[in-house]
Amino acid sequence: DTGVSQDPRHKITKRGQNVTFRCDPISEHNRLYWYRQTLGQGPEFLTYFQNEAQLEKSRLLSDRFSAERPKGSFSTLEIQRTEQGDSAMYLCASSLDLEEKLFFGSGTQLSVL
Amino acid sequence: AQTVTQSQPEMSVQEAETVTLSCTYDTSESDYYLFWYKQPPSRQMILVIRQEAYKQQNATENRFSVNFQKAAKSFSLKISDSQLGDAAMYFCAYRRFRDDKIIFGKGTRLHILP
């Protein structure tokens, strides 16, 4: 078990382009979370899945953002029509259950030019 | 709304010494969890220690211990015998009981001086 994997590690894009990030949680972890971390701030909750069901979305997640977790395995986070304000690190985390330890990936650093 | 405040943006400590990182939080809930996470340059957040609010005993994990003052809504982290590998950003965090969302503070950058 290699932990939570995120791809790509870095993404540079031009404003207005669409980007997609992938997260592979630890196998058998049914809870998967997305957080966003901007410079000088702690991570902020975006959304989470229990298996394939997306159960909560933050108000930070505008309708340009969409997340999926088909078949309850890996997850993707897509940002459409990127804006400079979307520049941040996007962190994925997973856990076996609500009361179990949360494991984080190393994040995808997005830079929107 | 729940908030987590870390008033020390940066701290330094000599190797082998003890350092305490401060955290305060605001909540109207009685059941919740508090955490300290470490984020090294590799960027991967790692759980350092966890405290359940209903437990009066302060949590400890090897060289890491907390001072949990529920009435004062204070949750400080003490690192004993500091090591070079302890250099990182440390985030205090809160989670309401039975809620999946974790609320993080802004972090404290800890430098270890050799």
Image (cartoon, helix red, strand yellow):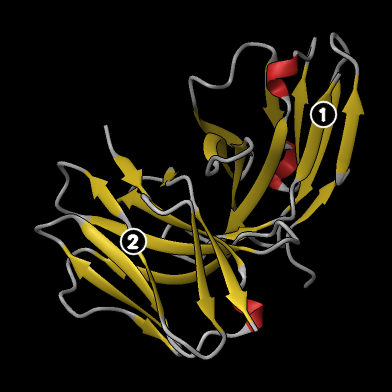
Task: Name the residue rendered at 90%, 16% in the picture.
Answer: A14
Q: Is residue B43 left or right of residue A35?
A: right
User: The disc labelled 2 sits on which kind of residue?
Assistant: Ser
Determine the CA span between mark 2 and mark 1: 32 Å
Q: Residue at x 22, y 69 (%)?
A: B68
Around disc 1, counting alpha carbons within 10 Å, would you say few (fewer than 14), some (14 to 19), or many (20 or more)?
some
- Could you tell me residue B67's position as x and y percent? 25, 73
Which label belongs to residue A61? none
Q: Which residue sits at x=52%, y=37%?
A: A44
Q: Classify 10 Å Cα crowding around label 2: few (below 14), some (14-19), many (20 and above).
A: some
In depth, the one of A63 and A87 nearer the eye is: A87
x and y percentages locating residue B55 in the rendered image:
19, 73
**Image-quadrant location for residue B46:** bottom right
The three-letter code of the residue at mark 1 reads: Ser
Looking at the image, which residue sits at the far left?
A: B71
Q: Secondary structure at mark 2?
A: loop
Residue under label 1 = A111
Q: Is residue A15 above or below residue B104?
A: above
Left or right of B30, for residue B103:
right
Residue at 77% x, 25% y is A78
Q: Quadrant of the C terminus of chain B?
A: bottom right
Quadrant (top left/top right/bottom left/bottom right) for the N terminus of chain B: top left
Q: Which residue is mark 2?
A: B22
Q: Is residue B70 left or right of residue A24?
A: left
Q: Secondary structure at mark 1?
A: strand
Query: Relative to the observer, which residue lies in front, A73 or B44?
Result: B44
Place of residue B28 in the rendered image (x, y in percent of width and height, measured from the top left): 15, 41
Marks 2 and 1: which is nearer the front? 2
The answer to which quarter of the image holds residue B20 is: bottom left
Q: Is residue B76 above or below residue B7?
A: below
